[in-house]
Amino acid sequence: MVAPTALPLAVTPHQERALDPLPFASPGVFDADLEAFLADASQQLCRWLGSAVSRPPLPGLSLLPAVEPETSGLGAERLLADLHLVMEGAYNPNHPGALAHLDPPPLSASLVGDLICAGLNNNLLAEELSPSLSRLERSLCGWLARRLGLGERSGGVPASGGSLSNLMALVAARESRGLRGVPEAVVLCGLDSHTSLEKAAMVMGLPAAALHRLPLDGDGRLEPALVAEYLESLSAAGVPVIALVATAGTTVRGAVDPLVELASLCRRHGVWLHVDAAIGGVLGLSERHRQRVDGLGQADSITINPQKLLGITKTSSLLLLADPSALERSFATGLPYMELSREGGHGGECGLQGSRSAEILKLWLGLRQLGLNGIEAVIEGAIQRRRSLQHLLHGAQDACELTLLSGPLHLLAFRPSQLDAAGCEQWSQHCRQRLLEHDLMLSRPRYQGKHHLKAVLGNPHTQGEHLQRLAAVVLQSLRPGELI
């Protein structure tokens, strides 16, 4: 029998267009077009970073190109032109006067890690989707946890921000105490604890009253004696405690709770101690400065955000635990559509996130680029800048003109001592605007009922001249006729 002759398929114009080359990297040959595109984009980024001093920290104008895709896809030249327009309206953390938030300039190796992470496009959901990167993640989390003192069997998992790290910690704490579905269970924290704890309680299905915020001492820290009384009263009343959340670096003043004493209390009462060290946790990596977060390694779990000081590109947060198996006990649901992991649970079984990118690359490359000496230098520089600014404003504090609020970290908040809430609001707006006119950007948090200005001194480009100019503007704002 003669086989029938195959007839040519009819191709509609729409289908014919769909067969045209699409903008994916070639799997078989070196892609020169991709190389050129990346080179041009890199040059554009390097020029933006290298011209940071010519633009203010906060752009005065933000323009956007068209948002929706056009009928035909755009080429590299048009895409980069549109990208440039977006970049011109972006916040400028590479400027030496960018001192408003916990957003330092990015490390160069971290930028490269982000690029390679995107290009590899691996998925940390399961080991077969990220063979080397899953092992790298487990190894680096283990090293970080051990370095912070959590013990030889410690480890953890990255998360897309400290809010998620805190949420996962509280879920693990609740599971470890067998308190799932117990409506009367509570979480204890300080008045200045991060707002993410309220979100965590909401997501966990806890009533708003389940989050007990305890008073602080004059330095913005939890008082162990008061916490002890509170724990004893809850125990006597039969109220179960999910966790005590201490803080190593509160958002406004950078206060660090007395972790050693709180850890002792938690052990005595059988309470999980979680430390939200998103801001101050990296100081535990430093031999010289780890005493500023003394007791960090005595926690059951720690949130740490290297993005906030070390220049790791966003997002870079980790939840580290003395017993990392608590993560799998809390979050494992089974991945029957994946091959078994060779070295333990899949990444998607060790936290709330399923699919996630290999953000561990930028942290790994960044830490190895810095080295332990570089980590030390970044931390030391930030502490010294805070001390310098504090010294420059000290005279106004002595004269009772300024109230300075700080802790052992690199944050400094201040306000006029004699003004009421309305006066502080007006002063903070006026002074911040004057600072912006000098390309110096501070934030304006409302704290203890009054607006303050806050300086975050983690920018390695900030020099003494910038701090002197900053202090001069602030002191000028306190002179008669300047306060409005």
Image (spheres, rainbow, N blue to C red):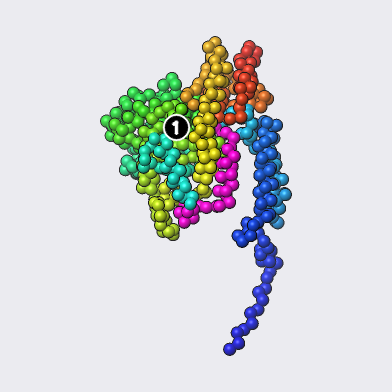
Q: Quadrant of residue 477?
A: top right
Residue beneath the point at 59% across and 39% down: 108
The structure residue drawn at horizontal position 38% and vertical position 41%, both measured from the top left corner, is 154
Percent of width and height locating residue 393: 56, 17
At which x and y percent is residue 138? 44, 46
Q: Residues within 10 Å of mark 1 (few under 14, many from 20)?
A: many
* Residue found 33% across the figure and 32% down from its top: 266
Position in image of residue 149 (x %, y %)? 39, 35
Kind of residue indicated by mark 1: Gly
Side (left or right) of 186 relative to 361: left
Residue at point 36%, 46% (across, down):
325
Look at mark 1 in the image and give the residue it sits on: 284
Whether residue 151 is visible to the viewer of this picture, yes or no, is: yes
Q: Is residue 64 above or below residue 192?
A: below
Q: Is residue 72 above or below residue 42?
A: below
Can residue 67 be found in the magenta stretch? Answer: no
Q: Nearer the viewer, residue 112 or 12?
A: 112
Question: Please, is residue 456 above or below residue 76 in the view?
Answer: above
Furthest residue to the bottom? 1
Q: How many marks?
A: 1
Residues rendered magenta in the picture = 102-131
| Picture quadrant where residue 467 is located | top right
Classify 465 as above or below 296.
above
